[in-house]
Amino acid sequence: MAFVEDRTPFFADFGIDATVGAGTVRGIFDNAFLAQMGVLGSDPQFLCETADVSSLARGSAITISGTGYKLVRKEADGTGLSVLTLELAA
């Protein structure tokens, strides 16, 4: 059975726009604090519609709120959403 829920209101209330290539993708940005093995930092992630990022490859440039990131990993969750794990662009 396919997941057919309309996520438009969810992204309208909580989402922000990200620039991906020449297009814009709406999603939810999370830049949580991360402490692993004594190293402190952040763990930027972007939750969005899988269809909006289906052709996105590792290393692709993404701009969110004026900050440049590159794609480290893309994980589809099976419901039509994907979590993009990002890192700051050099």
Image (tube, rainbow, N blue to C red):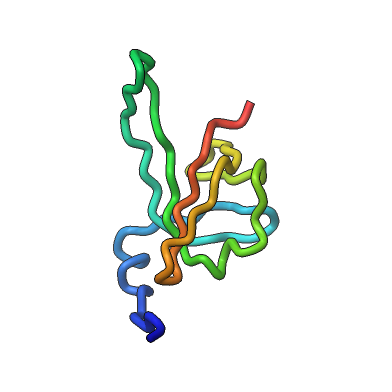
Residue lying farthest to the right in this orientation: 22
Location of the N terminus (image quadrant): bottom left
Residue 35's quadrant in the figure? top left
User: Percent from the top left, x then y, of residue 29?
Assistant: 40, 48
Residue 33 in the figure: left or right of residue 46: left
Name the one closer to the observer, 82 or 11. Answer: 82
| Relative to 69, residue 5 above or below | below
Q: Between 51 and 90, which is closer to the camera in this rendering?
A: 51
Q: Name which residue lies at 65% across and 45% down.
A: 58
Q: Residue at x 35, y 67 (%)?
A: 12
> As displayed, is residue 17 above or below residue 80?
above
Instruction: Determine which quarter of the picture holds residue 71.
Output: top right
**Image: 8 above or below 85:** below
Vertical side of 60 occupied by 82: above or below: below
Residue that extends furthest to the top in the rendered view of this protein: 38
Quadrant showing the C terminus: top right
- Where residue 3 sits: x, y (%)? 37, 80
